[in-house]
Amino acid sequence: MEAEQSLFQWQRVKRFNFSIWTVLVGVLVTRTSYFMAWPFLIVFLYQDYSVSAVDVGAMLAISALIASITGLYSGYLSDKFGRKLVMAVGSTIAAGAFSGIGLATEVWQFYLLVVLAGLMRPMIEAPSKAVISDNLADVKDRELALNIRYFVINLGGAIGPLLGVTLALAKPQLLFLATGAAFVVYLLLILVGIERKGSYTRPDTSNLPNFRAAMRVIAQDRIFLLLLIANFLMMFIYAQLESSIPQVIVRESPENAAKIIASLVLVNTLTIVVFQFPMLKWLEKVPLFTRTRIGMSLMALAQVGFIFTPADYPIGWALACFVISLGEVIAFPTLNVQIDRLAPPHLRGSYFGAAALYSLGFAAGPWIGGLMIEHFSAYWLFILCLLVSLVMIWLYWRAEGSTDEDDKQQEPVFR
C-alpha cells in the first residue's frame, strides 16, 4: 500500500498523455533559450546604455506587475475558452517581444518589450499547469507531473547560461532572437499537441461563474489568501537574486560581472536539477506546509550569507546562492501542488491565474531593491529580506492552522 502511494513509480509517468508531454517539451525548449539570453539583459543595459539601477528595477517591476494583472484574466479565460487558445496567444506575444529585444536600439523600446515579455508569461504558465491537472485524475500523478515541469524549467536554466556564455557573450542581443524563435516552435507544438481531437473532452463550463463571481469565490478562500501573501513575500526575496544581486555585482566588479552573474544562475539551476528529486524523496512523507517552511527557513539563512558577503567575493555569493536554491527546490514546487489541491476542477485555470498575483513580489522586489542599492546599500536590502523571510514563515504557520481548523470542523475549503 505504501509503495502505491509513493510518487516515484514508472506507472505514473506512463499515464502522461500527449498534451502533458507537449507542455513539458515546450517548457524545456523555451526556458533553455530564455535563460540563454535573459541573465545578460541587465549587463548590456548597464554597459551599453548606462541604464540606472532604479530604471532597470522599474522596467522589471512594471513587467511583473503586468504579468500579475494579466494572470487574473488569462487563467479565467482558459477556463472559459480553453487552454489552447490562451497559450497560443501568449506564445505569439512572447515570440514578438523577445525578437524585439534583440532588435531594439532605444531604452524606451526595451521598456515596452520587457513589459510585453511580462504580459505573455501568465498566459502560458497558468494554462499549462491547468493542462497537467486536467489530464491526470490521480492527485499523486499531478504532483509528480508538476514537479517534473519545475525540474524541466531548471534544466533549461542550467543549459541556457552555458549556451549563452559560449555562443554570444559579446553580442547577447542575438540570443533574444533565438528565444523568439523558440517560442514560435512552442506555438506550433501547442497548436498540434494541446486539446487534440479524439483525445480531449472539453470540460463542462455550464457551472463556470462569470469573472467577478469566480474572483469572489477565490477571495473567500482564506487559506489560499494566506498562501498568496506568503508567496508574494517569497517572490520579493527571490527577485533579489535575479535583479538586485546582479546590479550589486555589475557595479563592484564590472569587468567580471557577466561571468559571475552567469555562474550564479548556473549554481541556482544546477542545485535544483541535482537536488530536486532527492529532496522530494527525502521529504515525501513530510506534510506540504512543513515542507514549505523548511524551504523558507533555508531562504532566510541565505540572506545572512548575502549580508556578510563582500561584493567582490564570488565564492561567498555562490555559497549563499546554493543555500537559497536549496530552499527554492523545496518550497517552489510545493506551491503549485498546494494550489492544485485547493482549486475546484472547473476553476483550475482561475486559481492558477490568481496565484500569479504573488508574482507582484517580482514587481516590488526589483523596484525596492534598486532604490535601496541606489540610496542605501545592499547590506540594508538583505536585512529587510531576512525580516520578510520571518514574516512569510509565520504566515505559512497561520495557513496550516486554518487548514487544521477546517479539518476539525469538517468544512473543506472549495474542493
Image (cartoon, grey):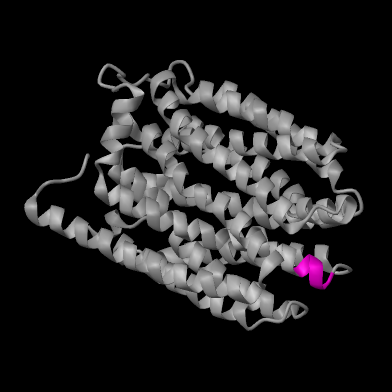
Please identify the quadrant where the C terminus is shown. top left
Indicate whether 400 appears above or below 45.
below
Start and end of the magenta stretch? 249-253
Q: Is residue 339 left or right of residue 370?
A: left
Residue lying at the far left of the rendered structure: 409
Q: Position of residue 384 (x, y in %)?
A: 52, 71
Q: Is residue 299 left or right of residue 281?
A: right
Q: Is residue 89 magenta?
A: no
What residue sits 57% from the left and 49% below the top? 363
Q: Position of residue 407 (x, y in %)?
A: 13, 54
Q: Is residue 251 magenta?
A: yes
Q: Position of residue 289 (x, y in %)?
A: 31, 62
How many numbered marks appear? 0
Q: Is residue 15 visible?
A: no
Indicate whether 127 appears above or below 332.
above
Q: Quadrant of residue 396?
A: bottom left
Q: Main secondary structure of the magenta part?
A: helix
Indicate whether 245 appears above or below 351.
below
Residue lying at the far right of the rendered structure: 170
Q: Position of residue 271 (x, y in %)?
A: 59, 67
Along the line of sight, the residue nearer the viewer: 12 or 324? 324
Indicate whether 25 appears above or below 325.
above
Please identify the quadrant where the N terminus is shown. bottom left
Q: Is residue 210 left or right of residue 72?
A: left
Q: Is residue 81 visible?
A: yes
Residue lying at the far bottom of the rendered structure: 308
What residue sits 61% from the left and 27% below the top? 189
What residue sits 52% from the left and 25% below the top? 86
